[in-house]
Image: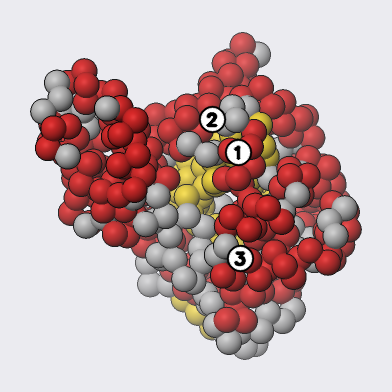
Amino acid sequence: MRFSLELVPKDPLWKLEIIGLMAENIGVDGLWLSEHPDNRSSILTACHLLKTFPRLWIGIGVLNPYMFHPLTIAQVAATLSEIAPRRVYIGVGAGDRTALEKAGIRRIHPLKRVERCVKIVREILEKGFYGDEEINMRLNFRPRSMVPIYIGAQGRRMLRLAGRIGDGVLVNHTNPEFLESAANEVRIGAEEADRRMEEIDLAAYLTISIGEDESKALKAAAPYSAHIICGAGGEFLERLGIDPGIVEEIRRLLRVGDWVRLYQVLPPDYIKATTFIGGVDELKELVARLLKIGYTQIVFGGPFGPRVLDAFRMIGEVVKYFEEDINRE
Amino acid sequence: MRRYLELDEEGRRKLVDGVLEIVLSSHNADLVPDEVGWKISDKFRSGELYDLHGFKLLLEAANRCEPVKLERLLEGIR
């Protein structure tokens, strides 16, 4: 079991550096940097953090093949491996539909695009070149180590694809029932490709708000929950029992940034259905359950909690508990 | 603000975590001058955030990104 933390490069690099130091202090193994076109570049942030932290691995999660050509992704992975061999992971995913539309890009055939992208990136990293009837590409230098490719997945078909071709899977859910069915889909994909689950690092990419005061934890998580709900499809909302009628209002409040009203409109049950709300014991319980389901990596993602320092101390307790548990075994 | 700089180390220690919390949870961190931010990070790394210079930098950062929250924190301590 590995533990990592999500960093969002919307904050200045010096602040990410401080949070990285805190992450190192609480004993997590690595950091996943999320990529959003309107934030700082996750790739350049990774360069800086890999040089800053000699122990932590850094994953970029995720680059989409619409904005990043597979050759660019391979070039990034190979270059980063020169800075930090064996400490670089690359995430590939379909990308956020709304963010892509804002950039004038239509997200068509996401499954095919992701599959082809992974194939090209992997071949370039392994053999130094890729060629087919359409493209012919080569890197003039070799990666200094293997760079595992993770697939960011939520939907059933993408999860199966991830099981078929990913070195790892970033399952972007927090709800344990969803995480369980996601793990099953990955398993089906792995079986289809005659792979064993042990070959795949199954990572639960959680949205957590840990704190002793539930109402404060809910408040901190509300905008995150709202983003999850607004980005979700009809099937997801139905499974969570979320009234589709409320989604338009949540979307409007997010657009204008009215957090006070958002918190009034968003029922606590919806926040709890989409994010983790609780204390140390509840988080231990969730992690134990995910371990049992077959997850091999836990990614703690923001907001972390209503108070950042307390949240890190509490996450540290959870990490330590499981590390001691593993050592006991 | 000046009188908080006159606090002894123990007094500063009581405040540092609160001020750091304000800076880390702020959504306005871009308002903090980068050179101040980098110095805070260096101080954090070397464990010198509690010395007078580190404390001064933190106060400056919090005052830039969350002046109201900082004032509320300092008033609570008074």
Label of residue A315 in the image: 2
Q: Disc 3, disc 2: CB below 8 Å?
A: no
The answer to which of A239 and A294 lies nearer the viewer is A239
Same chain? Circles 3 and 2: yes
Q: Position of residue B10 (x, y in %)?
A: 21, 18
Q: Is residue A13 visible?
A: no
Q: Secondary structure at mark 2?
A: helix
Q: Is residue A320 visible?
A: yes
Q: Nearer the viewer, mark 2 or mark 1?
A: 1
Q: Disc 3, disc 1: CB below 8 Å?
A: no
Q: Is residue A260 above or below residue B44?
A: below
State which quarter of the image contains the C terminus of chain B. Answer: top left
Q: Is residue B54 above or below residue A244?
A: above
Name the image quarter holding residue A213.
Answer: top right
Q: Secondary structure at mark 1?
A: helix
Identify the residue at horizontal 71%, vertical 56% (top origin).
A265
Q: Left or right: A104 with respect to A176?
A: left
Q: Which residue does the numbered mark 3 point to in the structure image?
A: A254
Label of residue B38 in the image: none
Q: Position of residue B49 (x, y in %)?
A: 22, 32
Q: Is residue A286 above or below residue A98?
A: above
Counting residues from the start of the chain, the first of labels 2 and 1 encountered is 1
Label of residue A217 in the image: 1
Identify the residue at horizontal 71%, vertical 38% (top origin).
A295
The answer to which of A311 and B42 lies nearer the viewer is A311
What's the coloring here? secondary structure
Q: Position of residue A50 (x, y in %)?
A: 35, 49
Q: Left or right: A261 with respect to A320?
A: right
Identify the residue at horizontal 78%, vertical 40% (top origin).
A176
Amino acid, disc 3: Leu
